Every structure is written in structure tokens, then in C-alpha cells.
Amino acid sequence: MILRSKFLFPWILFGAVIYYIFSRSSFSLPPRQEDFKQRFIGCDLSNGTWVRDNGSNHGYTNQTCKSLPESKNCGKYGKNGDYVRWRWQPARCELPRFNAKEFLEISRGKRMAFVGDSVARNQADSLVCLLAEMEIPKAFHKDPEDKFPIWHFESHNFTLMVMWTKFLVQGTERLINGSNSGVYDLHLDKIDQEWTKKLPFINHIVISSGHWFFGKIYLYEGGQLIGCIYCSEKIVRNNDPAFGLRKAFRKALQFLNKAEVFDQDNLIFLRTFSPAHFENGTWNGGGYCNRTRPFDEAEINLAGTYWEIRNAQVEEINKIKIASSRNAKRRFELLDITKAMMMRPDAHPDTNWNNQWMKGYSDCVHWCMPGAVDMWNDMLLTLLKKYLLEIGSGKAE
Ligand SMILES: *[C@@H]1O[C@H](CO)[C@@H](O)[C@H](O)[C@H]1NC(C)=O
Ligand SMILES: *[C@@H]1O[C@H](CO)[C@@H](O)[C@H](O)[C@H]1NC(C)=O
Ligand SMILES: *[C@@H]1O[C@H](CO)[C@@H](O)[C@H](O)[C@H]1NC(C)=O
Ligand SMILES: *[C@@H]1O[C@H](CO)[C@@H](O)[C@H](O)[C@H]1NC(C)=O
Ligand SMILES: *[C@@H]1O[C@H](CO)[C@@H](O)[C@H](O)[C@H]1NC(C)=O
Ligand SMILES: *[C@@H]1O[C@H](CO)[C@@H](O)[C@H](O)[C@H]1NC(C)=O
Ligand SMILES: *[C@@H]1O[C@H](CO)[C@@H](O)[C@H](O)[C@H]1NC(C)=O
């Protein structure tokens, strides 16, 4: 891990703050640490730019991480390696690089779950690779489709898992003449129990969803058809993906706020929408993503559906923060990666590999590993530390 000296100082200070909290029962911080804490908490990690960082090293490579999925191993399939040489620079502070030792210390005895689709899995796979520097976990892949994998890090008794769900709420694919149609019926007021039944005793949750909402979907509430995404029929109101997605997140957050399934402190992150970058065609219509450098702020579209979805997610998390403010044991946080990732059309696998994952199409949805997706875990660790500082100093909002 190569750290520049300007990063080292806050790290040491930060380590001291964490050490202080764990080693004392009194939480009034000395003035200098208090100052650092304020600076850190006031910083918006989601707003910034990607800066060139030729010395950058994510702590793992496709050689050192044995669990790196074939479909994300862009280096192996000949993608130009430039996409790893960028560092996310928030406008007003530094985002420290991931530190496996620190992450495992914080996670000792805890259980963490990524809830969502294959992009949630992408983040979990990145985390396992980042942690592999410290420990190769025991991996359990019990279900045949590998949608609920579990990793156990024995040295710290830390358990990491993925809970697969397309929509967070209940969705069923319509069968037409016995075969899958790609058309879904979605009940926006019914939680998908495939993931919620596995929730008990989980401390940290990262929920996300997104790409499955970009299809033909009939939307129901109270059993009544209330709308449809991408429909040509005029019989029901047509809505856009953001409409259905907002309601699905609202339901999931309300469920998590009420659920009596947790027995201790819980931190729930909503990882915001992860954009796709198909150009000159749709995913199944010849679209591709072969750019070789990040976009700057002027090149991204903050007026489109992606940003609308992200804004809906921000609004929903803010609502649930208010609704849950009396529950000191449960907190909701945003893991806001949308803008940063909108700037990374260069960081997807595209066509640089030849396995069956996307059946010959370009993959402009998932993210190469190592690569830009590792930043999500930099951010996750920083937010976990922020949370510990806040509860540690008794200043939880
Ligand atoms: C990084 O490397 C590229 C190409 O090798 C070079 O053009 C660029 O100036 C370097 N940037 C920095 C900040 O060192
Ligand atoms: C790792 O990526 C490099 C390119 O960065 C490639 O040459 C190599 O074959 C890959 N190795 C493995 C084991 O995937
Ligand atoms: C993002 O940072 C830039 C540069 O500091 C600032 O001009 C802009 O207002 C910020 N945007 C948001 C949404 O905070
Ligand atoms: C490991 O952590 C789990 C909670 O995730 C706890 O129930 C169990 O007792 C712990 N085991 C040990 C040996 O500390
Ligand atoms: C279903 O199969 C029947 C009989 O083979 C056929 O007439 C009908 O067009 C098919 N429906 C669809 C939607 O493909
Ligand atoms: C898409 O097509 C346009 C027009 O032909 C071209 O300018 C642009 O560079 C293409 N996009 C990519 C990623 O190649
Ligand atoms: C991307 O692919 C398009 C279509 O094959 C090609 O015209 C363009 O030159 C490519 N761009 C880069 C940067 O390789």
C-alpha cells in the first residue's frame, strides 16, 4: 500500500482517535482530535474528481486475490491498465485508501451483509480481495446459483455475506408459454423475504438495487395495478424506473427501521445507484464502453434518470433518518457513489474478456477489479469510522 505523506498524517491522527475511543470509557476528545473529527465529519465524500495517481495501488492484484471473479478480471483479458491509475479526490478532504487491518479490527465479532443484485456482489468481491491482504477467508458457496455466499474471517470472527435480491421487494417474472419473458410483476408494498428472512443478527448492512428496474415491469400496491415501467399499453399509467425504485427503497428502509430482527447496534447503508455506460447502442443492441479516461464534471449528465434515481434515494434515506431518530441503536447512512461512478465510463469490463457472463455483449454495468469499485470500500470504511466516532462521543444525531 503506497501512501503519500500528506495522507499519513491524518491516518495516524485518526488511528489515535479510534484507539482512544476503544481504550477509554470517557469520550471527551482533546481539542486537536475534536477539530479533526469535525473536519472529517463535515466533508462530503461524494463530491469530487478523479485525479491521476500513477503510484496508486489498491492493495491487491489479479495475482494476489485468488477469489477475483473471472468476469471482473479485466487485466487478464487485455484491457488497457490505465483505469486503475486514478484516485477519487473529494472536493474538501481526502478519502483515505482502504486499510484491511483497520477494517477487520472495526468489524471484530460483527456480521455484515450486502443486499442487492450482481453489482452489490461486485462490491462484496472487492471487499474480499481488499481484505485478502490480511486474511483469506473461509468461503461458503452453498446455493447452486451462488446468490447467498458467506465468507468468514476467523482471526476477527468477522462474517461477510451477500443476499441476492433483484428489487428488494417482491417481483415475479411472467412466464409466457412456459419460458421467461423478462417482464415482471412487482409488489411495491411487499418485501422480498428471500433476503429479510436471513437478516437476524446482522450488524452492518449495505443495501442497493437499480438495474433490474430498467425493464418492462407492472407495479402493484395493495394488489392493485398502479403503474408500469416501459409499457406501451395505455391502460395504466406509465412510470419511469425512478418511480418504482423509490418506492422499493422506501419499503425496504421502513422494513429495516421496524424490524425486530436485530439484537444490537445496526448501521444500515444505502449504496446509491451505480450507473451503466453503454454508448452507441443498448446493452443488447451493440452498445459498448471503450473510453480510456474518466469524465470530468462537465461531461456527466446530472439531469438524467441516473441522477434522478440517486436523488430519490437521498430523499428516502433522509426521511428514514427522521423516522428513526429516536432509535439510538439503528442508524441509516448514505454510501453515495453515483456521481463518482458516472465519471468512470472507462472502468467497466466492456468486451475485454470472453466468458459467458453477458453472453457476448459488452459489460458496461459491472466494474473491473481491481479498479474504481474499490473506492466504494474506501468510503465504506471511512463511514464506519465516522459512525464509531459519533456513537463514541455520544453525539449521534
Ligand atoms: C502518469 O503517467 C502518465 C503516462 O505514463 C503521464 O502522462 C502522466 O504525466 C503521469 N502523471 C503523474 C501525475 O505522474
Ligand atoms: C493479471 O493481469 C495482467 C495484466 O494486468 C495479465 O497480464 C495477467 O495475465 C493477469 N493474471 C491473472 C492470473 O489473471
Ligand atoms: C462540489 O464541489 C465543488 C468544488 O468545491 C463545489 O463548487 C460544488 O458546489 C460542490 N457541489 C455540491 C453538490 O456540493
Ligand atoms: C463470533 O461472532 C458471533 C456473532 O457474529 C458470535 O455469536 C460468536 O459467539 C462469536 N464467536 C466467538 C468465538 O467469539
Ligand atoms: C404461445 O404458444 C401458442 C401456441 O404455440 C402461440 O399461438 C402463441 O402465439 C404463443 N404466445 C406467445 C406470447 O408467444
Ligand atoms: C459513439 O458514436 C459517436 C458518433 O459516431 C462517436 O463520436 C463516439 O465516439 C462513439 N462513442 C464511443 C465510446 O466510441
Ligand atoms: C471504441 O469502439 C469504437 C467502435 O468499435 C471505435 O470506433 C472507437 O475508436 C473505439 N474507441 C477507443 C478509444 O478505442
Image (spheres, rainbow, N blue to C red):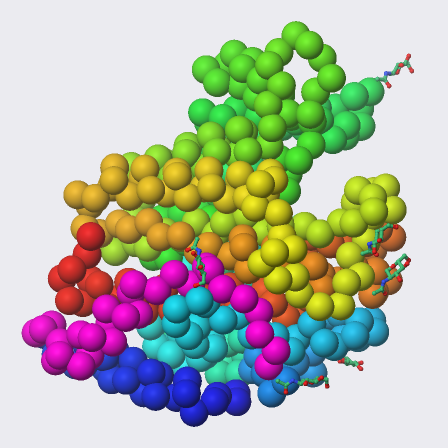
Above or below, 97 relative to 310: below
**34 left or right of 48?**
left
Task: Report whether 384 appears left or right of 336.
Answer: left
Image location (x, y in percent) of residue 227: 58, 17
Q: Residue at x 57, y 26 (%)?
A: 186
Q: In this view of the protein, which residue sits in the foreground, 394 or 127?
A: 394
Q: Position of residue 99 (x, y in %)?
A: 44, 79
269 versus 152 height, above or below: above
Q: Is residue 176 magenta?
A: no
Q: Is residue 349 visible?
A: yes
| Up-down relation of residue 318 to residue 20 (above or below) | above
Please state the horizontal and vertical placement of residue 395, each as a whole percent of the image.
Answer: 16, 60
Q: Quadrant of residue 391?
A: bottom left
Measuring 55% from the left and 60% from the top, which residue is drawn there? 340
Side of 143 where 220 appears, left or right: left
Q: Residue at x 29, y 80 (%)?
A: 14
Residue 32: say if magenta.
yes
Q: Horizontal and vertical percent for residue 40?
A: 30, 70
Q: Tell me where residue 77 sits by quadrant.
A: bottom right
Ligand 7 is located in which of the four quadrants? bottom right
- Which stretch appears magenta? 26-53
Number of numbered tags placed on the structure image:
0
Q: Nearer the viewer, residue 322 or 63?
A: 322
Residue 209 visible in the picture: no
